[in-house]
Image (cartoon, rainbow, N blue to C red):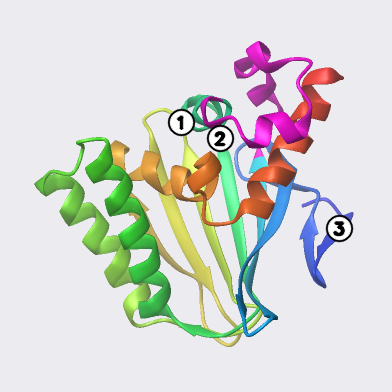
């Protein structure tokens, strides 16, 4: 892990994480909602990608981050790029794991159904993901990591919280893995608009370099 940090609402994110290859922090953001004019922040997100991702978004060279943030095809290209990816989610406001699992399950199921990819195998894989979070308690500073390997397409989800060992689950259904990525990076429908905007700007700089 690199020693340099990027702060996202007082949450530190290393600028680089290495699982099998060095992955660069290319986008950060928050999930939040406004209640009675108060902004409630739920978690901070860091998107780590292989630098090789720029080879798969060459069609957008010269576009500004603001333009890319509104281009769903651009995010489709990132999701489908056969590169290693890691999404790091740090909890800011505590929430029951069951609630987080339901949000994730619902968002992924909706995307699978819209793409006509929601069959029995997908339902089973998605239920396992939801069950994984069921018994967890997401205290502040707990960390959820989604690590995506490209060939074959699979995801490992891990959860770490103070005082407990790391819990992990592997997801090998390619359709579910794809839609988990799209839940985070689905352009206009992503769970965190600030994250996709930041990622668009981060990749725009890389492509221009």
Residue at the spot 25% in from the left edge and 62% down from the top edge = 128
Residue at the spot 45% in from the left edge and 43% down from the top edge = 182
Q: Residues within 10 Å of mark 3 (few under 14, many from 20)?
A: few
Q: Is residue 5 left or right of residue 87?
A: right
Q: Are marks 2 and 1 in contact (CB under 8 Å)?
A: yes
- Whole-angstrom CA distance, mark 2 to mark 1, is 6 Å
Q: Residues within 10 Å of mark 2 (few under 14, many from 20)?
A: many
Q: Residue furthest front?
A: 36
Residue at the spot 58% in from the left edge and 26% down from the top edge = 74
Q: Is residue 172 visible?
A: no
In the depicted structure, whether residue 61 falls above or below residue 71: above
Q: Is residue 44 left or right of residue 97?
A: right
Numbered tag placed on residue 5 in the rendering = 3
Q: Residue furthest left?
A: 120
N-terminal of the pair, mark 1 or mark 3, is 3
Question: Which range of residues does the magenta coloring cover?
Answer: 49-73
Q: Are marks 1 and 3 in contact (CB under 8 Å)?
A: no
Quick check: is 59 in the magenta stretch?
Answer: yes
Residue at the spot 51% in from the left edge and 77% down from the top edge = 165
For disc 1, the marked residue is 150
Q: Quadrant of residue 160?
A: bottom right
For disc 2, the marked residue is 84
Q: Position of residue 167 (x, y in %)?
A: 44, 70
N-terminal of the pair, mark 3 or mark 2, is 3
């Amino acid at each position: 892990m690199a020693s340099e940090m990027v702060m996202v609402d007082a949450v530190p994110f290393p600028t680089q994480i290495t699982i099998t290859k060095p992955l660069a922090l290319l986008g950060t953001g928050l999930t939040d909602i406004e209640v009675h004019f108060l902004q409630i922040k739920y978690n901070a997100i860091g998107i780590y990608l292989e630098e090789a991702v720029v080879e798969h978004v060459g069609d957008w060279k010269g576009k500004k981050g603001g333009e890319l943030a509104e281009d769903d095809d651009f995010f489709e290209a990132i999701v489908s790029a056969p590169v290693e990816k890691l999404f790091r989610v740090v909890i800011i406001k505590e929430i029951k794991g069951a609630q987080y699992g339901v949000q994730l399950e619902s968002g992924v199921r909706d995307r699978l159904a819209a793409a006509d990819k929601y069959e029995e195998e997908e339902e089973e894989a998605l239920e396992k993901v939801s069950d994984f979070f069921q018994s967890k308690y997401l205290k502040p500073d707990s960390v959820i990591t989604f690590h995506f390997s490209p060939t074959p397409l699979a995801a490992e989800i891990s959860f770490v919280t103070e005082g407990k060992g790391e819990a992990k689950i592997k997801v090998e259904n390619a359709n579910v893995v794809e839609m988990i990525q799209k839940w985070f990076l689905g352009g206009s429908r992503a769970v965190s608009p600030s994250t996709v905007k930041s990622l668009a700007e981060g990749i725009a700089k890389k492509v221009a370099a």
